[in-house]
Amino acid sequence: MYFIAIIFGVAGMLISWRLKSKFKTYSQTPLQSNLSGQEIAAQMLADHGISDVQIISVEGQLTDHYNPANRTVSRCRCGCCPRMWSRSPTRKSLFFPTVP
């Protein structure tokens, strides 16, 4: 009985380690579209005609999710992927235009 619990525990730790490792690797890879994570989420909603869902930022890592109770898409703003929410001053935003 304990043997099975140990196997599942070790397997869970290995899977968690692998997922976090892949996330760390790919969170440093720049996107070809040069869009932020928030802009991509907004574009996905707009492409499907969804206009009543709000995009919010939350603390944590790998915490992105949709909450149907309050119709929000939560995006992580962890220190591991700052490019997901921030924009460089030289990039023009599709959804949040700057006022001259």
Image: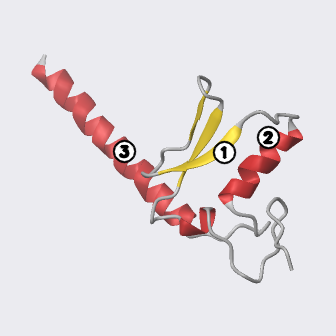
What number is the disc on residue 16?
3
Q: Are marks 1 and 3 in contact (CB under 8 Å)?
A: no
Query: Is residue 95 or residue 76 the one in the foreground?
Result: 95
User: Which of 74/70 is in front?
Assistant: 70
Q: Amino acid at mark 1?
A: Ile
The crowd level at tag 2 (other Cα within 10 Å; few <14, some 14-19, many 20+) is some
- Nearer mark to the viewer, of 1 and 3: 1
> In front: mark 3 or mark 2?
2
Mark 1 or 2, closer to the camera = 1
Q: Position of residue 91 (x, y in %)?
A: 78, 77
Apparent side of residue 50 relative to residue 22 in the rendered image (left or right)? right
Q: Which residue is mark 2?
A: 45
The image quadrant where one finds the N terminus is top left
Figure quadrant of residue 33: bottom right
Q: What amino acid does circle 3 point to? A: Ser
SS for tag 1? strand
Count the numbered circles shown. Answer: 3
Check contact, mark 1 vs mark 2: CB within 8 A: yes
Residue drawn at 69 percent across, 78 percent down: 88
How many angstroms separate mark 1 from mark 3 (CA)?
26 Å
Q: Seen in the image, is 87 located left or right of residue 2?
A: right
Vertical arrangement, residue 11 with respect to residue 69, above or below: below
Q: Kindly identify the residue that appears in the image at 76 percent across and 48 percent down.
A: 42
> What is the CA distance from the residue labelled 1 to the residue labelled 2?
10 Å
Residue designated by label 1? 55
N-term mark: 1 or 3: 3
Q: Quadrant of the C terminus?
A: bottom right
Residue appearing at x 77%, y 33% in the figure = 52
Residue 92 is drawn in which quadrant? bottom right
Q: Residues within 10 Å of mark 3 (few under 14, many from 20)?
A: few
Q: Tag 3's secondary structure?
A: helix
